[in-house]
Image (spheres, rainbow, N blue to C red):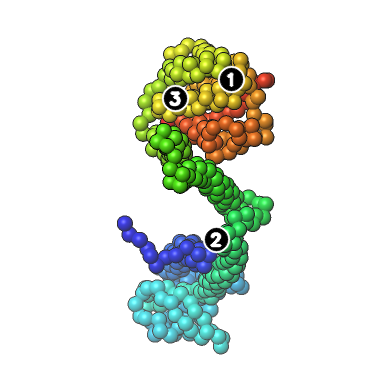
Amino acid sequence: MLRLKSLRFSALTVALGYIAVSVIVLLLFAAPIQYAWHEIVEERSTERLREDAHRLENVLRRDGPDALKAVIDTMVEAQPVDDEKFILLANPSLARVVGNLPAWPRDIPAASGTYTRSFDLNGRSVQAIFIRTTLPDGYNLVVGRNTAKFQTVETLFWVGLIGAATSVLVFGVLGGLLIRSALLSEIQEISQTAAAIVAGDLSRRLPRRGGANELDILAHTVNRMLEQIELLIQGIRNVSNSIAHDLRTPLTELRARLEELTVTRPPLEETFTEIDIAVADVDRVIAIFNALLRLAEIDNGARRSGFIPVDIAKVASDAVEFYQPLAELRGISLGFDVTGDAGECIAAGDPLLLAQAIGNLIDNALKYAPHKIRVFVRTAQQSEHAVTITVSDDGPGIPDQEKIKVVERFYRSDASRGTPGVGLGLSLVAAVTKLHGGSLILSDADPGLNATMVISQRPI
């Protein structure tokens, strides 16, 4: 593909392009007018002169020289003041017989035809077009018209055209310079904002004038992008801090335990007990990394390529069945129900991720709920293109101010400090629902919490 590397977009090149296009438009406008002028106006004037010459020739042939002289005198006397028409009848030796010219014009050839000549008339130079005709009996006739009026109009036309082209050029260059100055001012502000962001001030935003022009639209879009980047960077910082905090505790305990084993050299049975505890600490660290890797895989959309038709009701029923023994052990009633036709709850998805997400919601309900409460799982056809999985409990619920925060990675509320976990459960659920074109909705159950996964049934 041809690439015009020499052309670069700028206000000046746009202005020059505008000037070039405007000049071309003016030329396209002038060309047909100039053509019409020569082909219609001048040609029509010449044609009238030929008609006059032909009429006078007919008078000579029909009525003789005296009648021709009388007609010429009448034409001269009746001629308008502003219409300089020249008529001259001369004898075979080109001596004047009758007409409004004092003598035969110089440089008029002997042959009949149309000629454009300059001659002196009463001390002034006159440019005229002549029709020269040889008449019977040796008479010579010349009929002409002053073309000064035509030249004045043509001159005014070209002066106007050149003036318009000059105005386009001047205003185009000035407009280009003004636009360039305005753009450079805007770009300077953008550059300063970008430099501040590069220096670490993520709160800086591009200035907006409050209008609806192109630069304001661009600034609005870029500012939204910067806000998202700031949120992502803040999230990365929070995740990094949380990872460091959550890994430091088990690793510190593991090191202290192993160091104590090395120093005290306890009996074999106690040593193996400490080793089992150390293995549990390592498993806890591995679980954190596995959860992070799974979230990264979900965020990248890598699992979407393996989507298959999934019976959501069946996946939820299997999850309830899996957690049933744990619920009974804790004295909690765990139930399941399908609203509507179970066969309608089919969606394209990853059955393993969906099962894990539903399991996380059930596990959270069982983990934070007191004894002798009820946890209920329900699947339903929400609309024509969405199915829902809702896990409800009668537990303490989540305060409204924390409902947004609990889906953040590594976030743990005050109520969850004493329970095992690293704060990635609901983050995983939110990521899975987003991967499946839906969302996680947390609402009050009065008492308790409703955690609803909305799964899209549209093609992903």
Amino acid of disc 3: Ala
Image quadrant assignment for residue 452 = top right
Q: Nearer the viewer's eye, disc 1 or disc 2?
A: 1
- Identify the residue under disc 1: 392
Q: Report the Cα–Cα distance between label 2 and label 3.
A: 43 Å
- Identify the residue under disc 3: 355
Sooner in the amino-acid sequence: mark 1 or mark 3: 3
Measured as percent of width and height from the top left, residue 393 is found at 60, 20
* Quadrant including the N terminus: bottom left
Amino acid of disc 1: Ser
The extreme bottom residue here reads: 123
Sooner in the amino-acid sequence: mark 1 or mark 2: 2
* Quadrant including the C terminus: top left
For label 3, the SS is helix
- Identify the residue under disc 2: 198
Q: In percent of the image, x 58 and y 59: which residue is there? A: 200
Q: Nearer the viewer, residue 237 or 13?
A: 237
Q: Is residue 230 above or below residue 306?
A: below
